[in-house]
Amino acid sequence: MDAIVPQKDGTFKLSTNVGKDYICNNVLLAIGRRGTPRKLGIPGEESTKVAYRLLEPENISGKKVVVVGGGDAGVESAMLLMNDNEVLLVNRNENFAGIKPKNREAVTAAIDAGKMKAVYKANLVSIAPDSVLCKVGEDTQQLPNDLVYIFAGGELPTGFLQKAGIEITKRFGHIVKKHT
């Protein structure tokens, strides 16, 4: 889909990437809640060992895994992987204040029990075939790993939606959508 263009008669013209146009009365956009996963913009991020969602964690074992993201998605993924892998959770904040209370309790207990490790106030600098470079405070550390999972939020296709006549405004951390 290249474009959704509202027409004067209340219909929509859908333009596709194969050169065909369609006219319809309604359009249902199923882009999910996250949109496109947010990238970190660092060298090595295009590596095949990097993923932005966790599929079939039961098939991953015996690996050194870096999970980037201190939100619910990152914490939940780290906890799914921690029993069969060596997991390092990289959190850019100093705590897990913004997550569900049960997730905060569970991840804190897992870290305290040594089931996973966590670094705080940390950001990945680059990803190499067998390690990541991570800036922790003022220090930079090279951390060996096999896999990297990045949960840094998502980016809505705002331009595409605005061209379709959908007004998007952020209010109190919630995205409100209104068709104009």
Image: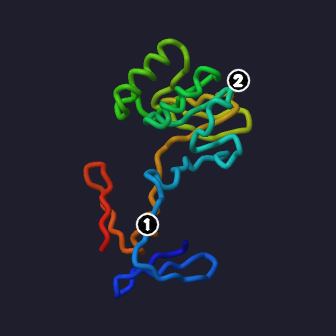
Query: 41 and 89: which one is in front?
Result: 89
The residue that appears at 49% across and 18% down in the rendered structure is 111
Whole-percent x, y for residue 161 in the image: 42, 68
What's under tag 2, amino acid-wise?
A: Gly
On screen, 65 above or below 13? above
Mark 2 / mark 1, whichever is N-terminal? 1
* Pointer 2 local density, CA inside 10 Å: few below 14, some 14–19, many at least 20: few
Whole-percent x, y for residue 7 in the image: 39, 85
Work out which residue is located at the far left of the displayed protein and give it. 172
* Pointer 1 local density, CA inside 10 Å: few below 14, some 14–19, many at least 20: few
| 129 sits left or right of 28 in the view | right
Whole-percent x, y for residue 66 in the image: 60, 31
On screen, 149 above or below 172? above
What's under tag 1, amino acid-wise?
A: Leu
Work out which residue is located at the far bottom of the displayed protein and give it. 8
- Classify mark 2: helix, strand or loop: loop
Q: Distance between the residues labelled 2 and 1?
A: 42 Å
Query: 5 and 127: which one is in front?
Result: 5
The residue that appears at 64% across and 29% down in the rendered structure is 58
Image quadrant in which the C terminus is located: bottom left
Image quarter of residue 52: top right
| 150 sits left or right of 98 in the view | right
The residue that appears at 46% across and 69% down in the rendered structure is 160
Q: Mark 2 points at which residue?
A: 62
- Classify mark 1: helix, strand or loop: loop
Image quadrant in which the N terminus is located: bottom right
For residue 28, the mark is 1
